[in-house]
Image (tube, helix red, strand yellow):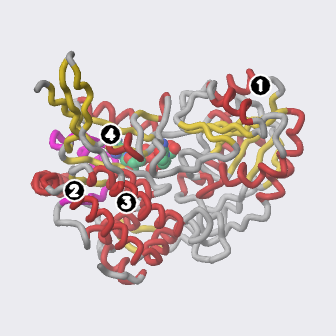
Amino acid sequence: MSNYTYDELLAAVSVADGKAAVDPATGEVIGNSPVQTVAELDELIATAAAAQPAWAALSDEERSAYLHKAADAVEASAEALAELLSREQGKPLNGPNARFEVGGCAAWLRAAADTPLPSEVIIDDESGYAEMHYRPIGVVGAISPWNWPMMISIWQIAPSLRMGNTVVIKPAGTTELSVLALVKVLNDVLPEGVLNIVTGSGRTIGDALSRDPRIGKLMFTGSTEVGKQIIAASAQNVARLTLELGGNDAGIVLPDADPAAIAEGLFWGAFINTGQTCAALKRLYVHDSIYDAVVDEVAKFAKNVPMGNGLEEQSLLGPLQNQGQFEIVDRLVESAKAAGARVVLGGEPDRDAPGHFYPTTIIADIDPQHELVLKEQFGPVLPIIRYSDLDEAIKLANELEFGLGSSVWTSDREQAMAVASRLQAGTTWINSHGGLHPMVPFGGAKQSGYGREFGVEGLKAVAEPHVISGR
Ligand code: NAD
């Protein structure tokens, strides 16, 4: 197993003539990723299909041992991986960002390795006998986004390999070097052909991957819009799907909450990864009686959190990952300002400065039906909405087509449980937002997707259930 330096890792994945990977903090080109063709994808799927029977024939223990070796390899090159991730994605090394993400890759590999999924006896009585086995599906096609490119790729790769599938992964166009480097590190210890990576555009390579009849299961994380295209593409072959799609998570602060005590949790719930997180807090409903205090406390905390180039050790917030995302955020905030919402913090980007930095922004006294509230901003902007009637706040929280996460903030546990039971979401957090655990199922309700990742549910999602019935 190698302990790569940044330069060695970059040299191992960057090509002389490819697509430029641009540092979103500076605009500098850091390397080039290969632009592959559909013919090359075809070969990679053939390789994955050929490698699958031997991989599936290994015992659970043998495959788990490989996943532990893969986690060791990630840990051995953690600093180089984090630096490349920071340079290409923009996220700072520190805080819940690049080093945290690389650590998460190792943790999720180990959790997939250590989670047992034995066959189960379903009935064994006078009515009959049946047992359930969890077989490999075959080749898994994985398509990942640019916000947590390494960790989300691992969420797709680790359970798939654990259950005896082989994988072809396609990263998002603006974070290809990061995932190429991760796959390079993993492939130093995995058997040949088990994990394959293809780079190229979503519309050609991603589409061809999701239509290929040799792909038994697609794991897709990205926007709801592209998720719908994947559903259509998969119909041809009845490919199994796990879809982790967009979110516009609501948080509701009840009147008994302590504004100073919850400010830090609210801030990181919303601004983790500079707001570019599927299950970030994206709209906050606060009871009128403590509205001003909550707005003040969150703003007070927010203005001391340093934003800057991710390689600077003090930075905890970074740039937006790409120009397109900067424009989405900028337009939504300008629209809120024009509609008379109050800018409590930020809201004035330096559009001529290098990189895609958008300042930490808090918007108060905004119409609950404004587009900054209704659309997924995916950036460092939190709209805070005033409510006086809890039923109305719950109705607003539930009225969108999204249902990924949600949160309730209160010191009354019983109230928290009562409100949580009325929220439509894959997860409702109490007094925090967005925390994930490798053993706790994660996924979306409504148009935030279907299927669950992590833990036993996550392993079942990449397996074919097979009943053997009779004595
Ligand atoms: P995106 O949908 O634009 O792209 C995701 C991936 O799909 C990329 O690899 C892209 O190249 C590929 N792709 C694009 N068109 C395709 C097509 N026609 N067929 C197949 N693949 C195609 O999303 P993004 O901008 O990279 O990521 C941001 C979005 O992802 C946000 O909406 C965010 O909420 C969501 N997200 C969800 C989760 C979750 O767990 N639910 C996690 C992270 C991000």
Residue type indicated by callout 3: Leu
Looking at the rendered structure, which numbered label has been put on residue 461? 4
Do labels 1 and 2 touch, CB within 8 Å?
no
Marks 1, 2: nearer the viewer: 1
Residue shown at the point (57%, 28%) measured from the top left: 424
Q: Earlier in the sequence, mark 4 or mark 3?
A: 3
Q: Mark 1 points at which residue?
A: 390
Answer yes or no: disc 4 within 8 Å of ligand 1: no
Measure how far apart labels 4 and 1 are at the Cα level: 36 Å
Marks 3, 1: nearer the viewer: 3
Q: In which quarter of the image is residue 111?
A: bottom left
Measure how far apart labels 1 and 2 are at the Cα level: 54 Å
Q: Earlier in the sequence, mark 2 or mark 4?
A: 2
Do labels 4 and 1 touch, CB within 8 Å?
no
Measure how far apart labels 2 and 4 are at the Cα level: 29 Å
Marks 2, 4: nearer the viewer: 4
Q: Name the residue under label 2.
A: 37
Q: In the structure shown, which secondary structural element does the residue marked by tag 3 occupy?
A: helix
Q: Mark 3 points at which residue?
A: 109
Image height of 308 relative to 389, above or below = below
Per the rendered image, the range of residues in magenta is 194-218
